[in-house]
Image (cartoon, rainbow, N blue to C red):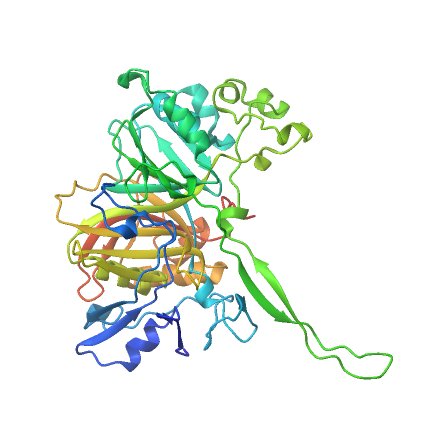
Amino acid sequence: MKFCSHSCKFWTWTCLFQVASLSKSRARGGLISTVSVAHAAFLPSSSFTSSSPSYCRSNVVNFPLATFTSSTSCFLWKSKPKINLTSTRLTASSSMPKNGLVSDEISTMDCFSTLTLLEHINLNVPNHDYILDFYNKVLGFGLDPRRAQNVVKGSGTVWMNCGASQFHLPFGEEAQVIPGSIGLWYDSLDGLKERLEQYNHIELDKRPFSEYEIVGWNGDGGDDDNATAIRVVDRYGNVFYCRSKKDPINVLIQTSSSASSNKEDGDIEKDTASPEIIPEIMRTAKQPVITNYLPRDIAEYTTAAKQYGLKQSSNQQTMSTSTSTSASSTECKGISYVEFLVPRNTAAKISEFYNCVLDATTSVYHDPSTGEDVAIVAFGSIDVDTGRSSQSLLFRETDQDLPPYDGHHIALYVGNNQADFEQAFKNAQEAQVVWVNPRFSDKATNLMTAKKWKQFRFKNIVDMETGKMIFELEHEVRSIEHEAWPGK
């Protein structure tokens, strides 16, 4: 596979999907491995205080090039190099886009992560009444019609949707808690602020959340929507950082039109470039939600629609009442990131795991003021000028004692076609991390069953040098051919 890298300003961009080629060409002894730096948009502080480092408060964060010393190749403990994903949209390139355009000679590799969408977070909850009010009436999520009947039954799993993403909320005796925080994004935080402030005079034990705080990026509690985060903690200890994110990452692909003749003078016109805008999946894909005003929703989900259906906005009032539920827009627009606290000296290894097994765009940021390393795993579109990505997973090192893994999981879509998904499964199988959760019906243990279910699972993030488990987090990895893919 062709290796390419190019520099722009103070950045060095190293193309994805290089690891196998690098592994074959470099010595096994001490080496310097450069990890791609196209990555996350929002990097939160696990403790949002005035002493937090400045990078935790920027809604567009540029990270320096992440370089770490390693003696590993992918799957070194098995003495086999990684096979790379084969997405047809990603090909090698050797130069940077100009004027924000990616020409037909320049790859979109730097503009997209192989991880297409961070789709849902699964958290057990012991009480749906509190949690539904929290997600729907406080955070501004919508109720998914595919699980709305469980609200009436008072049992089972409920899905609460925000844009292209979801939270799956099954009943469980013990609440599951993310050891870190979850980032949500909005067009504006005004509505969320108003709803939270309505609870100021309500007793704590009657609120659907335990606490909230409005903080400015510089810690001064500023009121400017673009410089403000709202920190909300649910009744079980899950921490949410809500921010406004107005600027989309639109990748412009410059294509050449075919040559045509000029009938008047016989000359052949030169190829002309016409840019094509590739919008973010997290903005264009939508999960369906029920409303409290569409006749079909009222008829089919009477109680659930009345309690948790989306209200009709002023601009929707001019639309036909026959409008599909999928056209309704939630106030919360999606998941920006999920941050996990991890043990010291693991961030670089976690970054390498995602790079090797899923060919993800990854980076490691080191904060010299705190000594914390943060592994960043990008999802969706990537802005090559700022380093922002549509979504991200963050793994922040800490000296804190971490709780034992309680079984929460994330679901993600990989690649741009079925071949990408199949290669991701082969990579995970090669890394010996494919896993079956007995709680769920999908039992993907080999490629045939993974293709049947159009998904597979793994739980252990492992050291690529030793195969030793570093961190536990169940991943539900899906093909875009999966029937639940919201980008259809």
Q: Position of residue 163 (x, y in %)?
A: 49, 40
Q: How many marks?
A: 0
Point out the image quarter for the N terminus.
Answer: bottom left
Q: Is residue 33 above or below residue 321?
A: below
- Write the residue at 48% across / 31% down: 142
Determine whether 203 is above or below 103 in the image.
above
483 or 205, which is in the foreground? 205
Left or right of 391: which side holds 313?
right
Q: Position of residue 159 (x, y in %)?
A: 43, 33
Q: Nearer the viewer, residue 451 or 146?
A: 146
Residue 35: quarter of image: bottom left
**Residue 342 location in percent, x, y?**
20, 50
252 or 426: nearer the viewer:
252
Q: Is residue 326 left or right of residue 240?
A: right
Residue for point 13% across, 45% down: 400
| Left or right of 316, for residue 236 | left
For this orientation, the residue located farthest to the right is 264
